[in-house]
Amino acid sequence: MSKKDNKEQAARGHGGMHVGLEKPKNFKGTFRRLLAYLRPRQVSLIIVFIAAVLGTAFNVLGPAVMGQTITVLFEGAHAKMQGIADAAIDFPKVGQLLLVLAGLYVFASLFQFIQQYMMAAVAQRTVYDLRENVFEKMNHLPLAYFDGRSHGDILSRVTNDIDTIATTLQQSMTQFITSFVTIIGIIIMMLWISPLLTVIAVVSIPLSIFVIKPLIKRSQKHFSEQQRTLGSLNGHIEEMYTGHQIVKAFGQEADSLDEFSEVNEELYDAGRRAQFISGIIMPLMSFIGNISYVLISIIGGILVTQRAITIGDIQAFITYTRQFSQPISQTANIANIIQSTIAAAERVFELLDEDEEEPVEDPVQMPDINGAVRFNHVDFGYDVTLLMENINLEAALGSTIAIVGPTGAGKTTLINLLMRFYDVKECSITIDGFDIRKMNRATLRQAFGIVLQDTWLFKGTIKDNIAYGKTDATDEAIFAAAKAARVDHFIQTLPDGYDTVLNEEASNISQGQKQLLTIARAMLADSPMMILDEATSSVDTRTEILIQQAMGELMKDRTSFVIAHRLSTIQDADLILVMDQGAIIEQGTHTNLMEQGGFYAELYNSQFADPLVG
């Protein structure tokens, strides 16, 4: 199977990458749902609408006043040309009309400013609420959601798609209101000047709709494809950026660039098609508008010669005709933008509609968790295929349980079940005799201190990173945890000590130093149970010995689960579980397992065998 085929199969298999190539599955429902976010700001929207009506009204009256001015000038000049006695141009009246015209445009600008100011606040507040909902939703999504989707696609929904909605609300919404009110106002003024010419101008509307409707339908699928490929491109960029050292180390720059070019080409093709089709709309609208303009000019000229209307009126009408085509074109363009926005909104709402972790009804109240853990005939699989079958385990209070086995044996899955990142179905896992499915997730997870092989530190001070999860910790407690983790000396050598700010990737400290900080974090949490997943994998041998001593003190009287590949670190464990292919194949103490001479003994001996011996 080719690389491209693999990508396509992954896109079909993962729910986060399945934005359809057709138009939104529920355009009306998504549109109504998006409008619901505007409902709390109805008062502001009413002010925006009133400001748009007044601003547009003053703008629409402008050409009529200008036409009257031209009529006064023309009639005065025409009378003088005919030699009429006392004929003259009424400049005082012209001056009054020009003052009125200036006032109209000043007030129009003022109300347009109010409209833009209020709408900016409405748009940003609406998108603020949407982002809040999305971020809150992500905190309640199960781990399975993130495991089954590209990080770039999720980021695209949270950033690019929401930004598209923000731009539409702030710019296109006000433009749509203004265009709609302008169309109504211009039609009223045109009817007042000449119903006959108005009929000619209005005929262009259904003709325009007939022309652009199929174009909008065709452009929608390309805009949806554009959003999908943008998510794929973001995913690739994010993946290559976070792993750029590995890419360079293995000399995969060319392959990375080829894959980027392939996805970028798809995005270019979808964007080109979408923008080309949407770009056709404006020229077509201009063409139809020009035909209408020519007809109005000819018939209007005939009416002026017949003195049916004044020359100022025809000039005003022609101006209205020009202004009439512009809001129609804008409305057509906005309709296209709305299609793209609805496609983006649907992706955001798909995230908001994902199933959350099921809340616990009437959770067990456990003020103190001791840490007696039991797995009862546990079966588990991420899909229909079982990865773990008939797992039975009993961890006595305060015992240390070591979990060993080859890669993919199910060690991390066992921990994920224990912390309810995934839930078992028919079987049960209990702590202190209580089914963990009856426990509040936050309470359950706070009962564990955890140190993973893959460290995670956020942008902030070292002190804040150590105190993560226990924000009320005193400085003395933070310092004590750092000393216990053997990281205090290193921190003291930094220019700002505990106030040193780590960057986004914490790349300004070494991998081993990151691991020490996460160990200090777990020590500060002082939880009744501990989970250590290769906690000392990134430190040197001397530091590992020191940390093992500190961890030994930390694990006293605490139930601890230790995932280890270096078997020398877990010889003193109370119980060693040997896992392979999702099953516990051996269990016992180090001494018992070595005496059995089974799988564990083979693993242990392979780590200490002399590679130079036969």
Image (cartoon, rainbow, N blue to C red):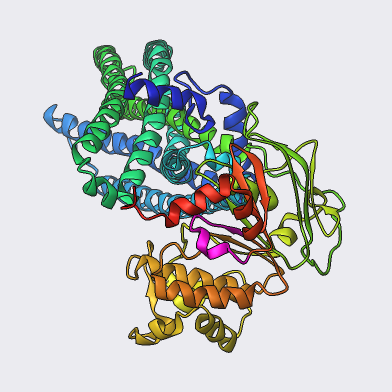
The part of the image, by quadrant, that contains residue 559 is: bottom right
Residue 494: give x, y in percent of width and height: 34, 83
Residue 412: give x, y in percent of width and height: 58, 48
The image shows a total of numbered marks equal to 0
The part of the image, by quadrant, that contains residue 33 is: top right
Relative to residue 551, is residue 105 depicted above or below?
A: above
Q: Is residue 471 left or right of residue 406?
A: right
Residue 178: give x, y in percent of width and height: 44, 38
- Which one is in front, 401 or 207? 401
Q: Is residue 564 magenta?
A: yes
Asked if residue 420 can be seen in this view, the reply is: no
Relative to residue 251, is residue 266 depicted above or below?
A: above
Q: Is residue 568 left or right of residue 43?
A: left
Relative to residue 287, is residue 567 depicted above or below?
A: below
- Which one is in front, 183 or 119? 119
Q: Residue furthest front?
A: 614
Give the residue drawn at x 18%, y 37%: 254
Residue 558: give x, y in percent of width and height: 71, 70
- The quarter of the rendered structure image containing the N terminus is top left
Give the residue drawn at x 84%, y 48%: 361
Q: Which residues are magenta?
A: 562-572
Q: Residue furthest bottom?
A: 476
- Which one is in front, 439 or 274? 439
Relative to residue 29, is residue 610 depicted above or below?
A: below
Q: Is residue 260 magenta?
A: no
Q: Is residue 196 left or right of residue 360?
A: left
Q: Is residue 571 left or right of residue 231?
A: right
Give the residue drawn at x 46%, y 71%: 544
Asked if residue 4 can be seen in this view, the reply is: yes
The part of the image, by quadrant, that contains residue 575 is: bottom right
- Which one is in front, 13 or 291? 13
